Image (cartoon, grey):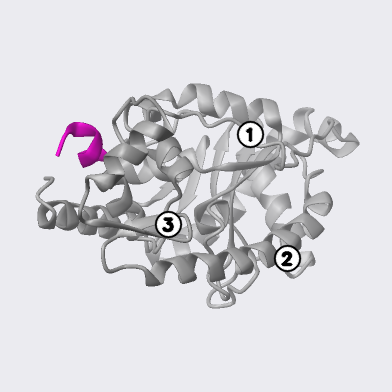
Amino acid sequence: MDQLQKNILKTLIYYDLFDYPLTIEEIQKYLFQTEHGGQEEIKKALAKIETIEEKDDYCFLAGRQEIVAIRQGRAKNAKEKWQILDKHLPKIIHIPFLRGLLASGSLALNNTDKDSDLDIFVIAAKNKIWTCRFFLMLKLKQLNILRHGQDTKNKICPNHFITEDHLTLGPRNIYTARLYSHLVPLLGSSIFFQVQRNNLWISHLIPAYPFGISNNDPIMERKQTASEKLLGYNIGWLLEKIFKFIQLTKIWSNPTHNSPYVIVSDKELAFHPKPQEPKILRQYQEQLEKYGLS
């Protein structure tokens, strides 16, 4: 196989780990580590790879045609979950010091199980991450849509916060590149484009990145609220400290806070105590070895 064929196979191997077959257009968009001439070149390369099959315009590893139906079923689940998120989004965008909201994880790929939650990635104002998180979590609780424990179905899970002066993401590997490249902006188009510009390292692994925004992706905007203006004075500095203490007390009481995938700082809060990342990276490497691509 030439390099293009190898990288097409690598791409399909990776997405196969999520039971996610790809169209030719998606292969072109998500292709790992290769610049190429376009869809016709990809079609020619695909025709020469014996370990790839096609059904209903989806490409997948030979013998894995069942994932076409899985993807189609999950897309229907995701449509329902998007409707739930769209319903509640206008109620939460005016949270003080909220600068951006992005859909993440399986929701961003429209690849959700019926019982899955709705992962969102949150961008807060500089020096206000604890205030933003406090009011966001409070609002989600009031709306009864905050994920808690095993209560996951159709609940919102804000599991990653960063501040507007800390937009460069990591660590840098194929898992995080895939995860961050698929983020879908919900609130704050300008901050979303800043996130893309600050993470062009992704393009070294996925050359087509950044993908841009589809016309079908509605992006809400917000203006500074009266409460935010009030909290911006000296009392805001004090409240930030108080909210930090309250939340840190709860975070430290959770036995999972020592996980390397839990990040706690004044610029980033990430809560992934049971991360997929190490498992996916291990499985991906095993599959590469199986197909002679390691």
Disc 1 versus disc 2: nearer the observer:
1
Disc sitting over residue 20 in the figure? none
Identity of the amino acid at label 1? Ile
For marks 3 and 1, give the CA distance: 27 Å
Disc sitting over residue 272 in the figure? 3
User: Which residue position holds label 1?
Assistant: 213
Identity of the amino acid at label 3? His
Callout 2: SS:
helix
Callout 1: SS:
loop
Horizontal side of residue 105 vs 291, given as left or right = right
Q: Are marks 2 and 3 in contact (CB under 8 Å)?
A: no
Report the quarter where the C terminus lies: top left
Q: Give the residue displayed 70% in from the left and 42% down from the top.
A: 217
Residue 288 location, x and y as percent? Answer: 16, 51
User: Which residue position holds label 2?
Assistant: 141
Of 50 and 284, the residue lying toward us: 50
Q: Please state the extent of the stretch shown in magenta in the rendering.
A: 1-7
